[in-house]
Amino acid sequence: MFGWKKKLDDAMAQLRPDLSRESLGVGPDFPGVAPNPLLSGDARKRNAELRTGALALGVLVDWREVNSNPRVVLMFDVETAEGISFRGIADEDLTITELTRLAPGQTLPVRYRPAVMDHYVALARDADPARVQQLSGEIASRKRT
């Protein structure tokens, strides 16, 4: 029974090479994309924590459809209020309308877990637009200096 999670991650990478760590642009510490996040206790816990995570801005790099729900994995270049940059991966269920509006280079608010920093992020659909604008200003002013 030991090592079953690693074998599952390896199986996912073999079944879907486009969802491998290398293809997503993350390091070896990335836990991987859950085959079914509704059945994974770790994924449910992570998603609950992300809903209350810290706000950051993510520039959409690319996305991969996982299934036709449509469940997609979104890849972001994330910038935090503290000046930390990292590749973020969001595993989201989108509507067809949301999916058709995706465009590389688009900046979207995301949430992440500062204490964990495991590359997982979630779309911050509940973010206050004024707070997102303030965060955008903070990041822009730091880049100018």
Image (cartoon, rainbow, N blue to C red):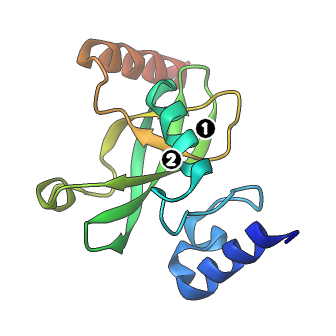
Q: Mark 2 packing: few (<14 Cα in 10 Å), some, or many (20+)?
A: some
- Disc number for residue 136: none
Amino acid type of disc 2? Asp
- Tell me which corner region of the image, top left, top right, bottom left or bottom right, holds residue 34: bottom right
Q: In this view, does 70 lie to the left or right of 20?
A: left
Badge 1 is on which residue? 85
The x and y percentages for residue 134 are: 36, 13
* Quadrant assignment for the C terminus: top right
- Front in this rendered view, residue 127 or 136: 127
Q: Which residue is drawn at 64% across and 31% down?
A: 84
Report how far apart the C-alphas of labels 2 and 1 lie in the structure. 7 Å
Identified at 63% across, 62% down, the residue is 32
Q: In the image, what residue occupies the spot 16% across and 55% down? A: 101
Q: Mark 2 points at which residue?
A: 77
Taking 16 as reference, is 66 above or below it?
above
Name the side, left or right, on which 125 lies relative to 47: left
In this picture, residue 60 sits left or right of residue 54: left
Query: Is label 2 in a helix, a strand or a loop?
Result: strand
Cβ atoms under marks 2 and 1 closer than 8 Å: yes
Residue 109: image x %, image y %?
36, 33
